[in-house]
Amino acid sequence: MTTYDGAQASSAAGSEGDTLAPVAPGEKTWGWFAVFNIWANDIQSLFGYSLVASLFISFGVSGWTAFAALIFAGLMVMVLVNLSGAAGEKYGIPYPVLARASMGTAGSKLPAVLRATVAVFWYGVQVYFASTALALLIRSLTGIEGGTEIMGMTGVDWLSFLIVWAFHIVIFWRGMAWVETFLNIAGPFVYLVMIGLLVVLWQRSDGQLLSAAQTIFANPEGTFATEVSGFIAIVGTMVAYFAAVMINFSDFSRYAKDRKAMVVGNLAGLPFNMILFSALALLTTAGAAVVYGEEIINPTEIVERTDSVLLAVIAAVTFFAATVGINLVANFIPAVNGIANLAPSKISFRTAGLITSFFALVIGGFWTSVIADIGIAGFVNTLGATLAPLYGIMIADYYISRKGKLDVDALYDMQGGKYHYKGGWNDAALIAFVLAAIFSVAAVWVPALGFLSGYAWLIGAALGGVIYAAMATSRVVV
């Protein structure tokens, strides 16, 4: 059994390049605040706000029920990422390398590609949402509306989209140090704008905002049963929203100074940000419904209605920064690592970044059509259900089969090491993934299984882990 040390980082880098090589102990510099900021940026993006606001509206539950569901989901995600991030923190390895332990040296490309595909898709979506903030800024300062719409966006919208897309390239081209610095600056400021927007809505609602937040979205004919089912559906959707980050959290935890930094950062970052952000989203969405008589889920649209140029400018800059922040952490890094894993010695960090950016340009442009067809909740739940079995397989392999111990040298042996299995593929993991994914995705879309839709992610993760553990226990070599 080989333990992790600094020498392994340099030996692995020879064949993997800098992107996938282990982070040496001396380079693990992220304290708890850096981990905290991962969640500050992940939760408070424009898409995150729109998702939370849509959950308040879609399920017809009281404000308190929805709020409690969001907090519970945050606590659940905290526990799950502490489990999935442990190997990254301990051994300094990214998710595509960790996946080799359960899937095989060649088989790991399947989950890495799936995760990268989801990340690239999210990346394009978040570029679009960040561009709405820039479009707001341009319209507020110039008064230009943009003219004829093409694919649901005006000329100003498309110009904003391309500028935001190019800005992402500039940031990642400078390297991970710039990414971390940008996150530490962008994370806290979105709350200032949200609070400012809340104050404006509070004043214009004539004191009705609090009562509206409790009752305005609830179904007047709702019962205790509908509140419970709504609670479960909201928890399931929010867990699915974080599904991708939960799988590849080792991509971030590998930079943590130690386990305490990871655990404290997750503890401070998830419950705190979920409570504060959800409360602000609930109150501003309710306030907009009272003041403007319309349920608005994009905060940039609410800011536009206030007719305050100063607030519009501040909000546009802040929302732009926050959404770029989540994109760099939750989507860009996983996509780059997954793409680089296809040919580690040939695809560099920058090359993988350019590939990611190209696909994001196409995907972001089609976002408005996609969301119109399936809706935010359906989109999130489908992606989460697809990825869920990978989480269960990874956890079962690391904690049950290997008792939390990995051979780092063998993870980088692509020819015939203990993680090579049969031709580089672990058939137990592949079978477990396919069977569990079919059922978890069906739980989202098959009407007869509709009563399980709120549990789709949990079902997929549990099935993947149980099937894998049952098939793999007798044959795993540690």
Image: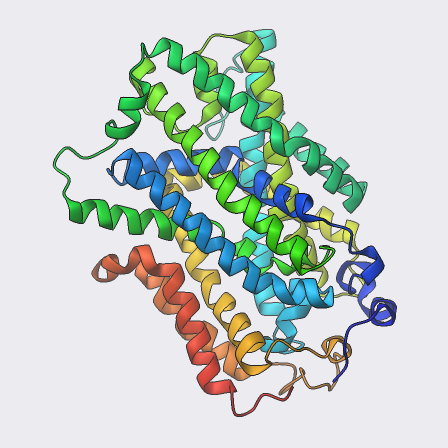
Q: Is residue 406 left or right of residue 323?
A: right
Can you give x and y, in whole percent of width and height, for residue 208 in the image? 29, 16
Q: Is residue 285 left or right of residue 429?
A: left
In the foreground, 464 or 395:
395
Q: Quadrant of residue 397?
A: bottom right
Taking 333 as reference, is 473 above or below it? below
In the foreground, 443 or 48:
48
Can you give x and y, in whole percent of width and height, for residue 448 in the image? 21, 61
In the foreground, 171 or 361:
171
Residue drawn where x is 38% and y is 37% of the image? 372
Q: Residue at the far bottom: name it.
A: 474
**In which quadrant of the rendered image does the C terminus lie?**
bottom right
Can you give x and y, in whole percent of width and height, for residue 280 in the image? 44, 28
Can you give x and y, in whole percent of width and height, for residue 256 in the image? 71, 55
**In which quadrant of the rendered image does the N terminus lie?**
bottom right
* Number of numbered callouts drawn: 0
Q: Quadrant of residue 324?
A: top right
Residue drawn where x is 58% and y is 39% of the image? 40
Residue drawn where x is 51% and y is 39% of the image? 273
Asked whether residue 154 appears in the rendered view, the answer is no
Asked whether residue 195 appears in the rendered view, the answer is yes
Q: Quadrant of residue 108?
A: bottom right
Q: Is residue 351 left or right of residue 186?
A: right
> Which color scheme does this rendered protein use?
rainbow
In the foreground, 378 or 248:
248
Taking 249 as reference, is 66 above or below it? above
Taking 105 as reference, is 226 above or below it? above
Residue drawn where x is 45% and y is 77% of the image? 432
